[in-house]
Amino acid sequence: MFEASGSLAVVQPVFTLVGLVVLPLLWALFVALVARPRTGRRIGSAAYDVLGPIVAVTGAVGTLGLAVVLAVRLALLPRGHLFVQHVAQLARLGQLDLAFDLALDPRSAAFALVIAIVACASALQTSWSSRAGAGARLAWSGLLTAGAMLLCVGDGFAPILVALGVLSLGAWGLSRGGGSGPNVAALAGNTAVLLGFVFLFWSLGGAFGPEGYDPDGAPRFVLVTTSSGGSDSEKATLVMTTHSGALVSSDDADLPNEPVASPFSIAVDPGVYTLRVQGGAASGDVLVPRVGLVAGRTHVLTPYGPTASLRALDDQFAVPRLAPAGGSATVRAALSGRTINGLRASAIVLLLALGGGLLYLHAGASRRGPSALVSVLEAVPAPYLALRLAPLVDPSATDGALVVLIGSGSAIVLAARAACVDDGHKALRGVLAAVASMAVVAAGLGDPSASLILASSAVVSTSAALAAIEARRDARWLGVAAAGVVGLLPGAGASFGYVLAISAALGSAAAGSVAWAVFAGGVAASLVVACTLGALAAFRVYDAVIRASARDPGRSRPEGVVVVVLAVVSLVGGVALGAGTTMFGGHISPLARRLTGTSALPAHPAMVGAAIVLSLVAAAGGVALARRASAGSTSPRWLFALGRPYDVLARIADGFGRAALFLQRSVAAMDRDVIDDVPAAVAASALGVGRGLRRLSRGVSGKVDPPLERAADVVAVKLDLDGPRAAERVRTAALLVMVALLGLVVLSSLLLG
């Protein structure tokens, strides 16, 4: 028996969660059908010009309104509540429960608001734009919005993986295919996240050793007594909200309307129960033996161990686990103590999942040409996955150092490349990718609130800057948006995110050993350098747009309104999320920390002050470098040198791509020139041998037949081929040979194809 007490999430079913994903899908489907060519012409250009944009804008506004309503409703509930909605049960095999569920907590609500704001602005800007192909952009924008929204509100591995696929498909459509590099990077990111989730699932219930997978033997369900009491003081309340459709019964006492299907909340008589959870035909029954239900208390039956549900995983962080030497431990400690081929399981999970998210950033930064504003949502997976997996990160251990290392390296490389790119759209998307990489670094440093501020403010500010490039009505708002991205305005936009991230790095350096202090100091320096390079890239675009606007000023007033609204929202949102006094020794926690549910270690006010100065100096230094780079008629040489690290990575990736292409062509050549020709050659040889034997038999007929017959009789007796089971042995041997050949063919197809 294992019972525990904790503070688990209180779920509330809300069917309207489905609308956050369905509304963008419906507008994408409608616009695609209306704008689709038929019989050589579009279905009534007038019908498209009226219905397509109206439906897209209506769907975008409806998505934004629904996101605002759900966020406000969630904010009015007590802390610890979240909205859920079960959509479908995909599979349940043993411990694996793949369900298509939706869940909205404060973290996902913040991202849902950002996605809805950007999607609404993108639909308006595309509808008012004079560029050709608006119908296709609106349709792909709806698909990309649906993927990003499903990523943030999906509960579990299945909806998140589907969302990543839809997101990459929408980005591919917006870029009109583009080059193969970004698409390959997005596909590699999907694969890496999938592998990370697989290792996370199995690592929660055991360890991979030399002899294979070894389960830890812990119970698969536990009863957790929460702090909330039931409505009836004489009854105990039994609740189960996960594993939808599972049947729960009691072996030694009857439950009301037994068996009870999950989700449920029932009042039962106090006592000791042995609960049986029946998952279905593909899952064995799980017993929770001899647990006590106390009158006036709420008891939650929750998964304990392998789970594909992120909200169930969040609950497991609040429930102590059984330690091997007795006592209890946290989920982070349990994963840190388990290894996969000698490596920490938590480090492998974080490397794969967050590395996959970073590949999305590189894919978005590499796409060419202008596209809809909603393309900035390709930067959402990395910071969102970092926020969801932040409880797994131990900032002072190997996994934390690994997250910080890959995130800071990605930030510097992406910012340096954005600084030397002449395409304004590509440069701004590169700056956004660099800021999102710094959000991953902040999660590795133990302050996910900085990740939330950096990601949300940078996404909205970058969309405002991209809209300003299209409108070219007032370049000053482009400067405001660029300043919001790089934290140039103190206390507004992403400024608080930079301050929190740098102060977390400085605090980590002060609290660790000498070696760790050097490492954390290098991380702080890398954040400052990335901020400087990002400001250089953003304000080079600003200078270029100012010059272009002087020659050809924009005249689109509606698009200018979109720019102003997005820029103001990004600045005000950064203030709302980051304002607080705890970093200076006060008691008011920033909203971002309350949304993420974490409390970072208190930093010394001197370190916070140093972080503020460093962030402002870094941004101002980037602006000064941009002015110097834009002063001449040609770009300086040192500017192009900044793109060499990314060129090296691109060449390495291209080398791997060429190697894969060589192997593919080799397999195709073998299939065409060898595998197809071998059977023909064998058949021709067999026919030739057969013809020769027939001629030989006619020539020696009657001369050697008796000796051959006598020799054959001797061989048959020696090999026992004249027995009654001889034919059966021959058939068995032939069957084994055929099976072996079939296995070789299958193995060859797997290895070569």
Image (tube, grey):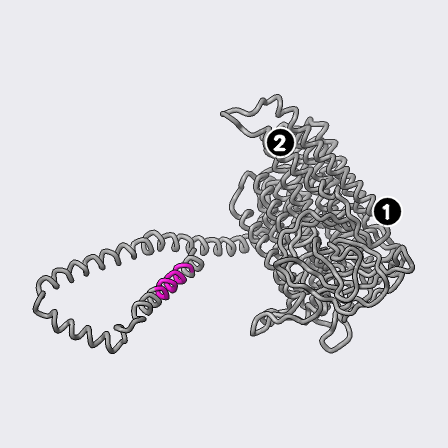
Residue with the mark numbered 2: 31
Q: What residue is drawn where x is 80% and y is 40%?
A: 69
Of 83 and 174, the residue lying toward us = 83
Residue drawn 77% across the image and 37% down it:
65
Q: Is residue 425 above or below residue 324?
A: above
Residue underneath mark 1: 76
Camera-side residue: 658 or 599? 599
User: Where residue 717 sits in the image (x, y, percent)?
Assistant: 24, 77
Q: Main secondary structure of the magenta part?
A: helix
Residue 219 quadrant: bottom right
Question: Label 1 is placed on what type of residue?
Answer: Leu
Label 1: state its secondary structure.
Answer: helix
Mark 1: few/some/many CA within 10 Å (<14, 14-19, 20+): few
Pointer 1 and pointer 2: residues touching (CB < 8 Å)? Answer: no
Please indicate whether residue 713 sits to the left or right of residue 284 in the image.
left
Residue 461 visible at all: no
Which residue: 42% across, 54% down?
662
In the displayed structure, 129 sits above or below 257; it is above
Sequence-wise, the earlier of marks 1 and 2 is: 2
**Residue 591 visible:** yes
The C terminus appears in which quarter of the rendering?
A: bottom left
Q: Residue furthest front?
A: 724
**Magenta includes 569?**
no
In x, y percent, where is residue 348? Answer: 62, 64
Q: Which residues are magenta?
A: 735-746
Question: Measured from the top left, where is residue 150 in percent x and y?
Answer: 68, 46
Give amino acid for label 2: Val
In the rendered image, the quadrant that contains the N terminus is: bottom right
Count how many numbered circles sit on residues in the image. 2
* x, y percent for residue 698: 10, 61
Q: Quadrant of residue 520?
A: bottom right
| Distance in Å between CA atoms under marks 1 and 2 | 36 Å
